[in-house]
């Protein structure tokens, strides 16, 4: 069973989808809770529509939208991950209000660090890490292209992977590149806050819990980026593997 399939299988019950909101940066699905995922898509859609049932998603079951997470359409996969996060029951006793960037900077001091995805905390991490590699599909200055992952990740003491790797289907291959003795974190609002990650070699899981759906969905529609959303209707939560030092 793939990681996505395992996460979907772990979900309890079902809910009617109240709203689906697709903004330029974030996608929100509101069912039991409000779930977020990174809006990911390509403009090329000659052979199929980006969202086959666009206009008819509200009112469907959340579980039906969760199946979109395995779609070959990136935009449908974004909706699917947001739907998973909207249905997921998070064990709040396992979570702490910890900012993933601050935690990585603390854990990365003097270490070789690989980050999949260019996050705002990269400059701070670069100042403390012994060596830092940032892998990106759209590299910025100082980044490496994503296809360098196999050359970089096995040499890293700390690996941080964006949750959007679930959307583009690269997550499991990236996790397989991590050394067993490395510290592995998956982070970002797309990331489902589930302990299932720990069965796949992940030590830390950092995601987002929406506490004010109306506020967050409005921001999604108005083009908010995540730094603007922090503290405005959403909590940043981190879950650690038991026994992690």
Image: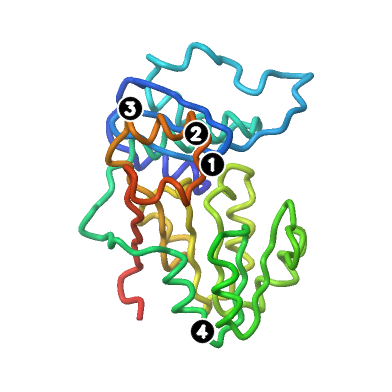
Q: Residue 183: percent from the left, percent from the top? A: 49, 74
| Mark number displayed over residue 178 | none
**Mark-to-mark CA distance, 4 and 1:** 29 Å
Q: Is residue 115 left or right of residue 218?
A: right
**Mark-to-mark CA distance, 2 and 1:** 6 Å
Residue underneath mark 4 = 109
Secondary structure category for the residue under label 1: strand
Query: Relative to residue 167, is residue 207 depicted above or below?
Result: below
**Mark-to-mark CA distance, 1 and 3:** 18 Å
Q: Earlier in the sequence, mark 4 or mark 1?
A: 1
Q: Residue 37: percent from the left, percent from the top? A: 49, 40
Q: Earlier in the sequence, mark 3 or mark 4?
A: 3
- Asked if labels 1 and 2 touch by Cβ distance under 8 angstroms, the answer is yes
- Which quadrant holds residue 132? bottom right
Report the front residue among 238 and 141.
Answer: 141
Q: Is residue 44 left or right of residue 54?
A: right
Secondary structure category for the residue under label 2: strand
Q: How many marks?
A: 4
Residue at figure coordinates x 51%, y 31% from the top left? 79
Secondary structure category for the residue under label 3: loop
Residue underneath mark 2 = 27
| Mark number displayed over residue 31 | 3
Q: Please rate how many residues cluster around mark 2, counting C-alpha atoms within 10 Å: few if below 14, some from 14 to 19, many from 20.
A: many
Which is in the foreground here, disc 1 or disc 3? 1
Residue underneath mark 1 = 38
Which is in the foreground here, disc 2 or disc 3? 2
Q: Earlier in the sequence, mark 1 or mark 3?
A: 3
Residue at figure coordinates x 48%, y 75% from the top left? 105
- Asked if labels 4 and 3 touch by Cβ distance under 8 angstroms, the answer is no
């Amino acid at each position: 069973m793939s990681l996505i399939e395992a996460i979907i299988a772990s979900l309890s019950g079902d809910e009617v989808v109240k709203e689906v909101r697709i903004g330029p940066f974030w996608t929100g699905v509101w069912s039991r809770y409000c779930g977020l995922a990174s809006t990911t898509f390509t403009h090329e859609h000659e052979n199929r529509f980006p969202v086959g049932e666009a206009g008819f998603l509200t009112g469907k079951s959340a579980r039906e939208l969760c199946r979109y997470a395995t779609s070959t359409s990136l935009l449908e996969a974004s909706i699917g991950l947001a739907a998973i996060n909207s249905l997921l029951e998070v064990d709040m006793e396992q979570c702490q209000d910890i900012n993933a960037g601050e935690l990585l900077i603390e854990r990365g001091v003097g270490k070789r660090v690989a980050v999949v995805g260019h996050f705002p905390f990269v400059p701070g991490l670069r100042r403390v890490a012994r060596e830092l590699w940032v892998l990106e599909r759209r590299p910025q200055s100082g980044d490496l292209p994503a296809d360098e992952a196999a050359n970089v990740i096995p040499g890293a003491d700390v690996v941080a992977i964006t949750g959007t790797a679930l959307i583009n289907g690269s997550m499991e291959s990236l996790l397989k590149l991590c050394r067993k003795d490395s510290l592995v974190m998956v982070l970002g609002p797309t990331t489902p806050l589930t302990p299932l990650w720990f069965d796949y070699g992940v030590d830390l899981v950092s995601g987002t819990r929406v506490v004010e759906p109306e506020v967050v969905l409005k921001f999604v529609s108005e083009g908010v980026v995540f730094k603007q959303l922090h503290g405005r209707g959403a909590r940043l939560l981190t879950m650690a593997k038991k026994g992690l030092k």
